[in-house]
Amino acid sequence: MMLKQQLKKARPRLNKSLPVRKCVLTGASGPSHQLIRFVTSPEGVVFPDIGNRLDGRGAWLKASGTVLAQAVKAKSLQKALKAKALAEDLPHLVERLLVERVQHLLGLGRRGGSVLGGAGKIRAASNPVAILLVATDASEREARGLASASGAEITIGCLSGEELGKVFGRPSLAFAACLTGNHGFAASLGEELARLQGVREE
């Protein structure tokens, strides 16, 4: 991404008793929304539980491309879950599911009026911008100008133009924004974007 990432912390949730989980590779603990949960299928295959909703014992990894690759190589998840095997191409599966989760949230926000697509609409927005999403293939100059003009609290660039465009029914889109007003939604979106960015960074 040409534009330097500005991953400030999203607004904290009202619930201060966030669950803490431990990464089975690094041993470091952190809020569950900063890690990725994995579970085992009845056939003994490890796969990601991106929404942390599936029953059964889980193992957690820090949302990091490097950690995920190392865990696959070291078979950390199989050992932690006493599993037979990993889902095919697990790192790519995790990345794809995170992209789909972010796109789903953006779609919900768009329908609810909290998410806008396109530089023109963002500049004309009546509410301030909480999160500015910049496509990885967007113009750096335009991105900097829009970030400054919108006064975005957070600027994130981890989705391609094609991935952003899919949310708005376009072949490609350079910019989208989550507006202030719904702090809970903005916090959830920021958390998922941070996880995706972590997984996509080497």
Image (cartoon, rainbow, N blue to C red):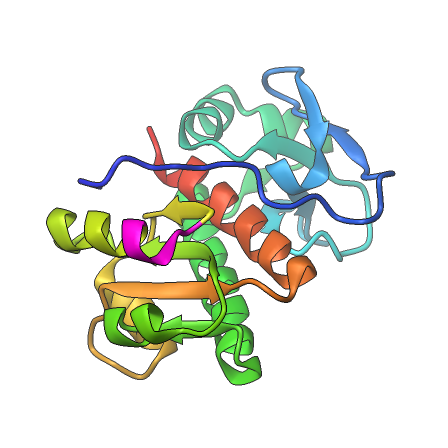
Residue 149 is one of the magenta-drawn residues: yes
Residue 147 is one of the magenta-drawn residues: no
Image quadrant for the N terminus? top left
Compared with residue 36, is residue 79 higher up or lower down, i.e. above or below? above
39 sits left or right of 155 in the view: right
Front-most of 148 and 31? 148
Front-most of 193 and 110? 110
189 sits left or right of 134 in the view: right
The residue lying at 69 percent from left, 46 percent from top is 40
What secondary structure is the stretch in magenta mostly built from?
helix
174 sits left or right of 95 in the view: left
Compared with residue 95, is residue 66 higher up or lower down, i.e. above or below? above
The residue lying at 53 percent from left, 35 percent from top is 63
- Residue 89 visible (yes or no): no
Q: List x then y, in percent, for residue 36.
A: 61, 41
Front-most of 188 and 96? 188
- The residue segment tinted magenta is 148-152
Q: Residue furthest top?
A: 27
The residue lying at 35 percent from left, 66 percent from top is 176
- Residue 179 visible (yes or no): yes
Front-most of 137 and 123? 123
Compared with residue 70, is residue 153 higher up or lower down, i.e. above or below? below
Q: List x then y, in percent, for residue 127.
A: 49, 69
Count of numbered circles in the view: 0
Q: List x then y, in percent, for residue 16.
A: 84, 39
